[in-house]
Amino acid sequence: MENTNILLFAGTVLPLICTPGPDMLFVASQTMSGGAGAGLRSTAGVCTGYIIHSALAALGVAAIIAASPTLFMVLRWLGIAYLAYLAARLIMSSLRVGAIAPTRAMAATNAFRRGFLTAVLNPKGMMIYFAILPQFIDHGRSVALQAALLSAVFIALCGMFFACLSIVLAMLGSRTSVSDRCRRWIEGIAGCLLLIAAGRLAT
């Protein structure tokens, strides 16, 4: 695959990565409520989730799913439902005064697992793999190898952007101590943002 094609693909997907969506909102909400560590664990989960999409694209299953509108619609609504579930949990937590924070190990597991599921069920990510990525593949060469290479570029860009976002948000948030009232506001706002994202995807 030519370097020009790789750069063109990177230039195409980077604005999509930087556009507020389920992944960005989830990583931001985790960072705001749990600090840089939670944001980075969420980022790792998101990137791991996209490895699943990469495997599907490399194996050609993505083309099969894209050819079945019914199957893609089912996956799309599963993603929307999961975002709504995350939003509801954050909003419910924001309504509880003095909620007990989970242990550090539990928070790490939850952040990674939720980030993984958010990416796997993210319709925006599916569209990148199912609609955009195939446009940059030369069918005269190994399709699986090209799909794997382009997927690696996409995942690397996601990892770098979300990691930087986590660190910046954590630095801004560390200037003030987070009281229980502040935590509730942060979780409430983050839950509403995720709910808005789910609503936008649904419509």
Image (tube, rainbow, N blue to C red):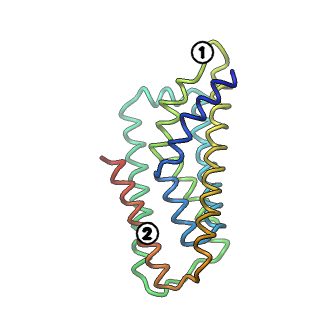
- The residue lying toward the viewer, choosing from 22 and 66, is 22
Disc 2 crowd, CA 10 A, few/some/many (<14, 14-19, 20+): some
Label number found at residue 139 = 1
SS type, badge 1: loop
Residue at the spot 52% in from the left edge and 23% down from the top edge: 135
Q: Is residue 15 left or right of residue 171?
A: left
Rendered location of residue 153, percent (x, y)? 65, 37
Q: Is residue 103 left or right of residue 12?
A: right
First reached walking from the N terminus: tag 2 or tag 1: 2
Q: Is residue 17 left or right of residue 72?
A: right
Give the residue furthest to the left: 203
Residue at the spot 59% in from the left edge and 52% down from the top edge: 46
Residue at the spot 63% in from the left edge and 32% down from the top edge: 150
How many numbered marks, from 0 up?
2
Rendered location of residue 160, percent (x, y)? 66, 50
SS type, badge 2: helix
- The residue lying toward the viewer, choosing from 130 and 16, is 16
Q: Amino acid at mark 2?
A: Arg
For residue 115, above or below residue 109: above
Picture quadrant where residue 45 is located: bottom right
Whole-number angstrom distance, CA of label 2 to CA of label 1:
45 Å
- The residue lying toward the viewer, choosing from 157 and 144, is 157
Rendered location of residue 172, percent (x, y)? 59, 70
Residue at the spot 63% in from the left edge and 35% down from the top edge: 151
Q: Quadrant of the N terminus?
A: top right
Q: Amino acid at mark 1?
A: His
Of the residues tagged 2 and 1, which is closer to the observer? 1
Q: From the image, tell me which residue sits under label 2.
A: 89
